[in-house]
Image (tube, coloured by chain):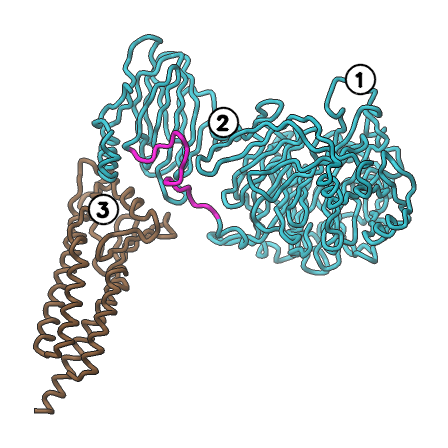
Amino acid sequence: MAVQRWFGQAALATLALGAVACSAPSPSRLVTGDAASRTYVPPGEHDEYYSFMSGGYSGNVTVYGLPSGRLLKTIPVFSQFPENGYGYSEETKPMLETSYGFLPWDDTHHPQLSQTDGMPDGRWLFINGNNTPRVARIDLTTFETDEIIEIPHSAGGHASPFVTPNSEYLVSAVRFSLPVPNKDVPIETYKQNFKGSLSFVTANKPGEMDIAFQILMPGYNYDLGRAGKAKSEGWFFFTTYNTEQAYTLLELNASKNDKDYIAAVNWKVAEKCVADGKAKVAPARYMHNTMDHGSRSATSETKTSVKMLVPADCPGVLYFLPTPKSPHGVDVDPTGEYIVGGGKLASVIPVHSFTKMLAAIEAKDFENELDGIPVLRYESVIAGEVERPGLGPLHTEFDGKGNAYTTMFISSEVVKWKLGTWEVLDRMPVYYSVGHLMIPGGDGVTPWGKYLVAMNKITKDRYLPTGAELTHSAQLIDISGEKMEMLLDFPTQGEPHYAQALPASMIKDKQVKFFSLADNTHPWATKSEAEATVERRGKAVHVKAIAVRSHFAPDVIEGVEVGDTVYWHVTSIEQDWDIVHGFAVLGMRTAEIIIAPGETRTIKFVPQEPGVYPFYCTDFCSALHQEMQGYLRVSAPGSGVKLTAGLSERSATQQARAARTVPPSAAAPVAPAGGKGGR
Amino acid sequence: MTPRMRLLLGLTMVVGLAALVLPLWEVRLGAPQYPEGLGLQIFAHTVAGIKEHDLQNINGLNHYIGMQEIRPDAIPELKFMPWIIVGLLVAGAAVAWRGSRRALLIWLVVFALLGAVGLWDFWRWEYDYGHNLDMDKAIIIVPGMTYQPPLIGSKQLLNFTATAWPGFGALALGVPFLAGVVVLLRSRRRGGEAT
């Protein structure tokens, strides 16, 4: 927010000086007459696109339909989510394990859809955690976080998790350079001791995400990245700032150089150097968390080393392209030829040419060399500059028709310009202070160039006021015509830094409706009512419970003592679409669990005092939802109350009913209904 | 009966065998919260959900109104119905082989009677499920309400619209029967001309 404020003040100052490159916003042209009908999705009908927005400091991903702007789902990723128990249930807690311990929060920035042949393929969504750098993979058949890998030697994993055109790798580059490995050094030794790193993570093997290699970099800040594509496939581009290597008051000290760099990484060369054994094995400690699909339980694994490549040991792997004034975004056009820098403090948008870059490398047309990294000449690689584009250019995406769209944070507008001629074609004011923009497929080789979503940081008077902290907003713009047309404006959750979108038809028919009870491999799964029971293992009491409309079994439990830890394993034996149950106990020091049909979720409950503890279903499951409840009796230590899993009259009926449907061999061990505890 | 008629009649018995694998009857249930629908298929040998878990889900819903659980292994008819169908078709083939009009007439009458008994039995089965409710275990009690699904056509049962129609198995079984009727009528006319 401090940076935003600074920019905001700069913007006001610039406005006052009358030096604004663009005309003042004219609200009259913002919304055309039929905008409402073009974004109206009638009741019961579906949106055309799924869009996935990062939640920023919520640590989540939010899913919105386009063009309606309706919120469809919040997917918890790096933050505990009391709404469904993610990060609270025993099955999901390991997803939030890191080398720093259990972390209940992070800051999500950039959603990235997996790609095949340079376009979203609808398999997964990747997202980064910025604070304690991690990358997550979300499965797009379940809309659940399936895998998280921590990035070692890293802080501020901002340039992440952009992917190569066939998802061979996703990247994570550091914002904060650090001592590598991290150690206790005086901060004033920044220039000697601090290094950056670019991580390449294997992305196309679900369950096996791994740090393929890291490239050790000069101690700059790395900001954003994009893969080369089409003709530049095999390269990756990263922006740098703070090439001044300041460690204090960066807003001033990191803004001194006239040019910083775009780092061009030839990842095919890097791959080869690693294969040839030129990377060193560096000690590291990081975690890899995966969700098992049978038990729907996560496990954590600690990894202890990483392959570290030093650019000087691998000639041809890396070049610096000088780029004006602390570039933020780096975006590659659909042909792969143009590399657009978003020099946030620059007065032009510089566009590099991939062809010219290759020619300059071939000719060894270098300005100098930094840590073994050749620096190309700006004049040799620049294709053109967009002049007077607006103030504070940040991010660019493309419509696949030869046009580029760049956000202007300070002048608060989206600017359309033409690749090749660099002329500004159109401007659309947005409210206020736009960060990223997103065109569905707009980072790919054939964008679906119909809509553009601008993600704004400040809303002030745009909605009904709601206290000091206000929502951020998204604005939907039609870009199918020559002029941009504003269609819709909707509030968003947390801070959607960036979004990606794909046509709904690509994934909507692949959605899991429920999980197969028969395939549930959870060690404490209870697959029929007849198997419901309680079991004592020392001080641990395991309740094997089922949930089905409209009761739990068992629903009367006695014999638990203060000092025991109760593990309540609740299996939903439903096999029906959109019938979920929830579970909560009086006084539990955790969140509820939501249990999807066929899955098992576990709550850990440690009663503190003798007494009776009611529990109930928290998700309105059926007409008799309010009856879906039970009681746990907790006695004083040593009271000798026998452990029993009793059944109410109604569930006794249910148990008898269930017992009839299981084969006699399976039904044999069942004790008579009404009490079968004391095991 | 000409040899060609006998051959064709014999071949329709093979068509009738499809009744052993295709559903004889279908009952579909729709409700506001079930846009995708639930349904049962009555086969000669079993009762199954149209979708994998439909039978389980229908039983789950039925417990609210005290209805008995539908358990295919507890319905004795399903154990001998396939044999009745096979027997009927084998007899039909024998009739075609012999080419006797009189045998054909008897076969048709038996077929029609068995069909009528089968439908009556299905109706009786539906009546039992719909009326024989366990009121001690029923959770939702609507005075006077019964839950007998229709034999054919549509009927509203609380929030569900139940619709029943013959399945492809019943249609397959209709083929040899109708062929038999046609053969009977045509052979009578020709027989009359010949004598």
Foreground of the two, A266 or A174: A266
Residue drawn at (38%, 15%), measured in percent from left and top?
A538
Vertical position of residue B102 compared to residue A144: above or below: below
Vertical position of residue B97 compared to residue A407: above or below: below
Left or right: A347 as drawn, with respect to B162: right
In the rendered image, the residue lying farthest to the front is: A276
Left or right: A548 as drawn, with respect to A594: left
First in residue order: circle 2 vs circle 1: 2
- The residue pinned by badge 2 equals A88
Would you say the residues marked 1 and 3 are in contact, meaning their CB atoms lie under 8 Å apart?
A: no
Tell me which segment is drawn in magenta.
Answer: A511-529
Query: Residue under mark 3: which chain is it in?
Result: B
Would you say the residues marked 2 and 1 are in contact, meaning their CB atoms lie under 8 Å apart?
A: no
Foreground of the two, B45 or A279: A279
Q: Amino acid at mark 1?
A: Pro
Q: Which mark is residue A186?
A: 1
Query: Residue under mark 2: which chain is it in?
Result: A
The color chain B is rendered in: brown
In space, the residues marked 2 and 1 are separated at their CA atoms by 38 Å
Circle 1 or circle 3, nearest the eye: 1
Left or right: A360 as drawn, with respect to A296: right
The color chain A is rendered in: cyan
Are there few (<14), some (14-19), or many (20+) residues within 10 Å of tag 1?
A: few
Q: Amino acid at mark 2?
A: Tyr
Residue A547 position within the rendered picture, expressed as x and y whole percent measured from the top left: 35, 33
Q: Which mark is residue B70?
A: 3
